[in-house]
Amino acid sequence: MNFSKYKKSIIACVLALGIGVGGGYYFFGNPVTHQTTVKEQTKQTKPITDTRNTYVVQAAKESGPAVVGITTQVFQKDIFNRTIYAGEGVGSGVLIDNDGHIVTNNHVVAGAKNGEVTVSLSNGSTVTGTVIGTDAQTDLAVVKIDPPKDIQPIKIGDSDSLQVGEPAIAIGNPLGLEFKGSVTSGVISALARTIDDQGQRFPLIQTDAAINPGNSGGALINADGELIGINSSKISKEGVEGMGFAIPINSAMTVVDSIIKNGKVVRPYIGVWVVDRQTAARNNVSYEGEGLLIVQLDANGPAAQAGLVEGDTIAQVDGKDISTLLELKEQIDAKSPGDTVLVSYTHNGKMKSTKLKLGQATSK
């Protein structure tokens, strides 16, 4: 294999592939002359019957107050490099504790001026929120508000216990705050979905509950009203319907806890840029050996210090076969900086093993 011949194109491909799980938020640019107004009808003329009081109704009542709207002022540079106001982006967020911490998507708060956003609570009031930390790799962020007296944080569920086919309910603000607190229901369509091999940090939950722009950062809950995921993206292609995705809450809370504690995410670091066989083939490169092809290394990183070089292929970590980048990330992310892992790799057609001490990387 003439690796050096194709190295630049492969690296460009790797670096060009982003997180890929952003679902967008609703953007308001220049003021418009007409705006849809939706009036909420809350008056109840008679007690709800047991037939109408479904699990969706009960779960929405339980968790709805914890779902908030997040408005971010968006600024851009003009042709003279001046900063100008471009409009507002509106997404969703979820109150997770009594201290006023809100989980949302990174892309919802990206570019917030002075790290401040406007948070619209379910009781109709608005407060100022401070972005205390973000993580672009997982598309997660945490906003902090002064907790109101009537704060009602959501109950955290267990995404590892989910079953395909069980009910799933999405709550958020599709198309902006005029539709705040919208509830859609469906089922868990699939678990451990991969939609971006290179940029995705962990497997996603797939649901057919409707998720639209503005829902990003909102809650995916189970029939008990427990938070099981953070809505993050929706496939929007002609002829494709009912495919929404959420970040599993068990994975998300690891990131969120680190942001709350450190203001950033601290994760283990191996110091390699790798591609799988399919990505390499798209760049007219083939390679021998099992696993992932190393296309670039941090010269001072753990892998390079352990003797791995460009053109080697990583086949196993701690005895577990590695065939996708997501599998490698999961194995490394399960460790802590400073831990030692056993890496099996192919070098010049021969299988070797070495121990390497994981470094530390932090989110910006």
Image: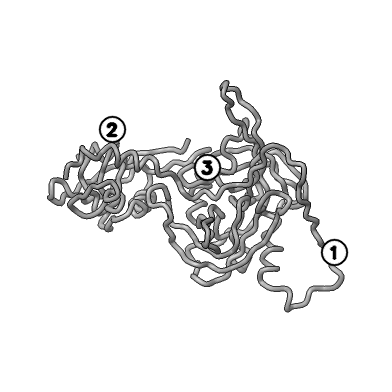
Q: Which mark is residue 62?
A: none
Q: Is residue 161 above or below residue 336?
A: below
Q: Are marks 3 and 1 in contact (CB under 8 Å)?
A: no
Question: Seen in the image, is 217 located left or right of residue 274?
Answer: right
Q: Of label 3 and label 1, which has the lower sequence position?
A: 1
State which quadrant residue 146 falls in. Answer: top right
Disc 2 marks a residue whose amino acid type is: Asn
Q: Of label 3 and label 2, which has the lower sequence position?
A: 3
Disc 3 marks a residue whose amino acid type is: Ile
**Which residue matches tag 3?**
259
| Residue 354 visible within the image | yes
Q: How is the image coloured?
A: one colour
The span from disc 3 to disc 2 (Cα, nearest Å) is 26 Å
**Which residue matches tag 2?**
300
Q: Residues within 10 Å of mark 3 (few under 14, many from 20)?
A: many
Question: Seen in the image, is 283 located left or right of residue 210?
Answer: left
**Which residue matches tag 1?**
43
Q: Secondary structure at mark 1?
A: loop
Disc 1 marks a residue whose amino acid type is: Lys
Front-lying residue, 279 or 209: 279
Give the number of the mark in front: 2 or 1: 1
Q: Secondary structure at mark 2?
A: loop
The percent position of residue 232, horizontal first and vertical second, equals 54, 52
The span from disc 2 to disc 1 (Cα, nearest Å) is 65 Å
